[in-house]
Image (cartoon, rainbow, N blue to C red):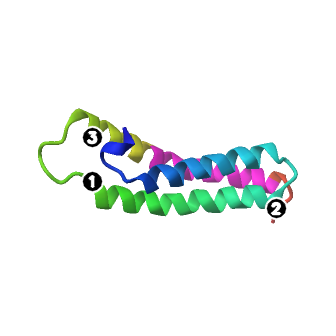
Amino acid sequence: CMGYIFPASYAWGNFSILAVGIWAIVQRDSLDAIMMFLSGLLLTVLTDIIHISVFYPSNNSVTDLKRFTVGMAILSLLLKPVSCYFVYQMYRERGGE
C-alpha cells in the first residue's frame, strides 16, 4: 500500500530500522546496537514527518486506499515515540548512562 503515495525511501528507511531493531534485540550485551536502533528511530520520526507532509495528497479525489495508507503512516509515526521510550529503557537496563 505504501507504493501508491510514498516513495521507496519511506519503506527502505523503516524496514532498515526494523532490521537494526531485530539485531539490537538479538545482541543482548551490545550497547552499540541498541544505541543505533534508538538513533535510527529518532531519525525515522523526522523523515516520516517530511514524507507525510510532502507526499500527502492535496486533491479532493483521495481514494480509500490512499487514505488508509496515510492513516497507517500517521499511526506508525504516533507509535514511534512510545517505541523510543521502551528502547531507551532497554538501553538503561543494559548499562547505558
> Are the two marked residues, 3 and 2, in contact with CB atoms closer than 8 angstroms?
no
**In the image, residue 77 lies in the stretch drawn in magenta:** yes
Report whether 12 appears left or right of 73.
Answer: right
Identify which residue is drawn at 47% across, 45% down: 76
- Describe the element under mark 2 as helix, strand or loop: loop
> Are the two marked residues, 2 and 1, in contact with CB atoms closer than 8 angstroms?
no
The percent coordinates of residue 18 (x first, y second) are 61, 46
Quarter of the image that includes the N terminus: top left
Q: Amino acid at mark 3?
A: Lys
Mark 3 = which residue? 66
Q: Nearer the viewer, residue 85 or 69?
A: 69
Q: Amino acid at mark 2?
A: Gly
Q: Earlier in the sequence, mark 3 or mark 2?
A: 3
Identify which residue is drawn at 84% across, 47% down: 28
Q: Amino acid at mark 1?
A: Tyr
The numbered dot on residue 46 is none
Examine the rendered structure and indicate whether residue 45 appears above or below residue 86: below
- Describe the element under mark 1 as helix, strand or loop: loop
Mark 2 = which residue? 96
The percent coordinates of residue 71 (x first, y second) are 34, 41
Quarter of the image that includes the C terminus: bottom right
Identify which residue is drawn at 65% across, 47% down: 19
Identify which residue is drawn at 32% across, 36% down: 68
Disc 2: CA contacts within 10 A as few (<14), some (14-19) or many (>=20): few
Most common secondary structure along the magenta stretch: helix
Mark 1 = which residue? 56
**In the image, residue 40 lies in the stretch drawn in magenta:** no
In the image, which residues are magenta? 76-92
Disc 1: CA contacts within 10 A as few (<14), some (14-19) or many (>=20): some
Marker count (numbered): 3
